[in-house]
Amino acid sequence: MSGAELLLQEARCTQASLALQLTTAEQQQSLDLLLSVSPFIGRVLTQQPELATQLLDKKALSQDWQYQNPLLSLTELNENNVFRALRRYRNQVLAQVMAAELLGVKTIRRCLTEISALADGLINSAYQWAYADLTPQWGTPLDHKGVPMPLLILGMGKLGGGELNFSSDIDLIFTYPDNGDTQGGRRSIEHQQFFTKLGQKLISALHQVTADGFAYRVDMRLRPFGDSGPLVLSFGSMEDYYQAQGREWERYAMLKARVLNPDPVWTPQLQQLLKPFVYRRYIDFSALESLRRMKQLIEQENRRRNRTDNIKLGSGGIREVEFVVQTLQLIRGGRLPDLQQVSVFAAMEALCRHQLWSEADTLQLTKDYLWLRRVEQVLQGIDDAQTQTLPQDELNRARLVLALGLSDWSEFSALTEACMTRIHQQFKAVIDQGDNPEPEALALGRLCWDSQLPAQELAEQLDWLQPEQGLELLAELQQFKLDCQKRSVGPRGRDLLEKLLPFLLQLLAKQQGSATVLKRLLGVFRQIVSRTAYLELLHENPAALQQLVLLCAKSGWLAEHLARYPMLLDELIDPALLYQVPQMTDYQDRLRQQMLRVPADDLELQMEVLRQFKQAQQLRIAAADISGILPLMKVSDHLTFLAEALIAQVVELAWAQMAEKYGVPQGLSGPDDKAFAVIGYGKLGGLELGYGSDLDLVFVHQSNPDGATDGDKSIDSRQFYIKLVQRIVHIFSTRTASGVLYEVDTRLRPAGNSGLLAVHINTYRDYLQSEAWTWEHQALVRARLVYGGERIRQSFVQIRAEILGQTRDPQQLLSEVVEMRQKLRQHHGMNSTEVKHATGGIVDLEFISQFLVLAHAASYPALYQYSDNIRILDAAQSCGLLSDTQVADLQQAYRQLRGVSHRQTLAPAAEEPAEVQQAMTSVQQVWQQLFGAGSELQL
């Protein structure tokens, strides 16, 4: 049985179930056609059999249709009755329109007009009912003249153009004239609250699915801020949004906006408000560039989805006609008001009148467009389904062929293919960009940034990610867009974001970046989105943006660092310089040169320059670190020497300020003699600074304790040095726009927090000799003078040698070291998994080296020659205190654990590598060998 025969059989079965009485052969023929093509008509007749006479009366169908409000006949306007009346009337009229088209009594253009008029009427009926239903409870919004204020409903897309599909969504935007409070109801509320309730009620009246189906699927995503924005906006808010944040695709959308419930007072005001956003006063070729990008996205999406059979979205489809017409409208419409049409047909006629298209081209394009719209209407009228895809099954193909009056599918295919080929040629002629198309990878970035496609569909484009990861990435991007909408981003900033974000996403795709990487990058962008200079920097320097992506992909710490201090983006401009760290001895010279450019009396600027220097150098060190240019030990060396350069500069600044105010202590040998030193403890003393390390500092002086300063405002020397240290700590610790320089910890000074900030070197020695605890001697192992003249340096070296070289009771020392380690474990958690504090971690290794120094330095002075762990272990090996194997294992473990510590700062990992556990085991084994089986730290 052929497809046509099957359709006729189905039609007769439907007719039998309807029990219709037909009087003529023509009526039977018409009914066979309607029921064969459209099961939808069959369903409507089943619900409303009284419509059969109307659907088969060609003369009545050919008449101009007029909307009749279905709610006027209702005696009770409750929700159920209203919803039922709207839906049944919608189905009735659509069945009539479909019948008129199939029976050949109305053209497709007349059908489109009537379908749009039906939507206008039903929307207005639902609106008027909802408004009247709300006012008794909530009152009426009034303008300044006391006149009820309307909610203006903008119809977008084909509804706005008066060319609505048979079974289409309707795109709406709600707006109201002004803010205020309602009057006359049981309760008064703000206008926005009232109109929001009204909008919600209107949507429900149209959108909600009942036993009678739905009236229209309502899509509100074209409103300002999309789904995340308020349902209704005042005129003022609409104007602010489109002036400040409106995007290119929104110009295309707003071009077809039409007020569906026009008001003689407020509609002209709204149109005047929106017009400058849509149409420019100059010939605007930016619209052409925007269309070119859309074309690439369309073609990319068509290839991915294999949309060869989609008459709307495929190559040469309905959308290409509309895009071409709208683009020419946007380019010329500001100068030619005649082009400012919401109807695609009216716009094509205007383009022809102004000789932007030839008459022949216009007639052919209109004819081809109408053919596709007719095919679309039949496709959707078959089963009241929103589809533009040609059927693959024989039955629905037969329906389409029969409805269009063709002989077979081959004839239909040939006609449609020729039509779409001509449309695509016209499309390419308008937007042809020669031999320089935008890279497809950049088109993917634009798709993610600009597209209004559902996230599920966009996620499919991110083929290097799993679907859930793609959704996570898109969620980050969407949140950033929402954040930007809430910020004061000017027109230039928006323009730069439109250019930068697709490129950023292209680079992310190239790096196979995850949502986490995008989150880091957008964290940087959030800090600069309202600072156009930084956006300009990244736009004008693509290499800087590439480096930003690389660094954020490798390090969360660097991403946070760049977000906190955006001025560091300057450092990314030249990658060769970015990864080129100074020589160890160059930090002081470079810093000194930068400080020479700062006025000596501008402390605030001096503090800023110090911080910016540190951040820039730290960025370079980190970049060289994560790229493998600097090995671990060199990273710590560079961070340590950078800190020493800054310490020296801070002391010089503080000294100059103190000297200007109080003079200098008497008895100094010359201008370079300060009789003052800074002793670095902990990681600074051990040349092991990390990226987030603070500075453990002790300050000593060697001046005459009974002397005074030589200035006009003289104070005793001890007070001078205490004030000097207070000033030093202030310069380090004060938080400026560029953060703190370093956190400074002075608790290791004699007597801790209760002691003086600066003590005489002899007091320092006496304290260590007679009052210090064993743990303070352990700390001295890692102490090193990081600033000071030669005389005080020699004094410190001698003191350190005296204290560390003391003869100690081995068992008592062992007991005290183990006890101190146990206290630290309790403080940081007995089961800590941090590489620093865990069993077998860095602290255990440091305790081993400190114990060896304190226990054996009296016999082996080489043990305290250096303050870093690696060289202490070398000395222990040379002295025969540890075997070659033990030292090799400990040094390898130390490097591995320090490496993990660095990586945890730069780029935390969920799991530690296997070698870390092996390193900790090596440390534990040596610990047991040194401290015995009874140690609390053994396995």
Image (cartoon, rainbow, N blue to C red):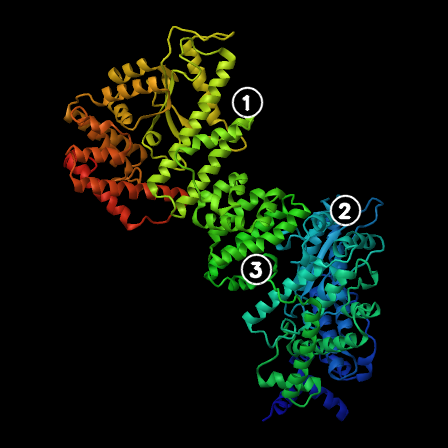
Tag 2: residue type?
Asp
| Residue highlighted by disc 3 | 442
Quarter of the image where one finds residue 370: bottom right
Residue 903's x, y, as percent? 37, 44
Q: Is residue 899 left or right of residue 821?
A: right
Residue 834 in view, yes or no: no
| Residue highlighted by disc 2 | 178
Residue 338 in view, yes or no: yes
Name the front one of labels 3 and 1.
1
User: Mark 2 and 1 residues: CB-CB less than 8 Å, in contact?
Assistant: no
Q: Is residue 747 left or right of residue 861?
A: right
In percent of the image, x 79 and y 84: which residue is there?
57
Name the front one of labels 2 and 1.
1
Mark 2 → mark 1, Cα distance in angstroms: 57 Å
Position of 934 relative to 124 (above/below): above
Quarter of the rendering occupied by the C terminus: top left
User: Foreground: 703 or 159?
Assistant: 703
In percent of the image, x 24 and y 22: which residue is there?
801
Question: Circle 1: is it few (<14), some (14-19), or many (20+) Cα within 10 Å?
Answer: few
Q: Quick one: SS at disc 3?
A: helix
Quarter of the image where one finds residue 2: bottom right
Residue 19's x, y, as percent? 69, 86
Position of 11 relative to 853 (above/below): below
Residue 421's x, y, as percent? 67, 78
Mark 3 → mark 1, Cα distance in angstroms: 50 Å
Tag 1: residue type?
Ala
Mark 2 → mark 3, Cα distance in angstroms: 42 Å
| Residue highlighted by disc 1 | 600
Q: Which callout, 2 or 3, points at the residue further toward the start of the chain?
A: 2
Name the front one of labels 2 and 3.
3
Position of 398 relative to 877 (above/below): below
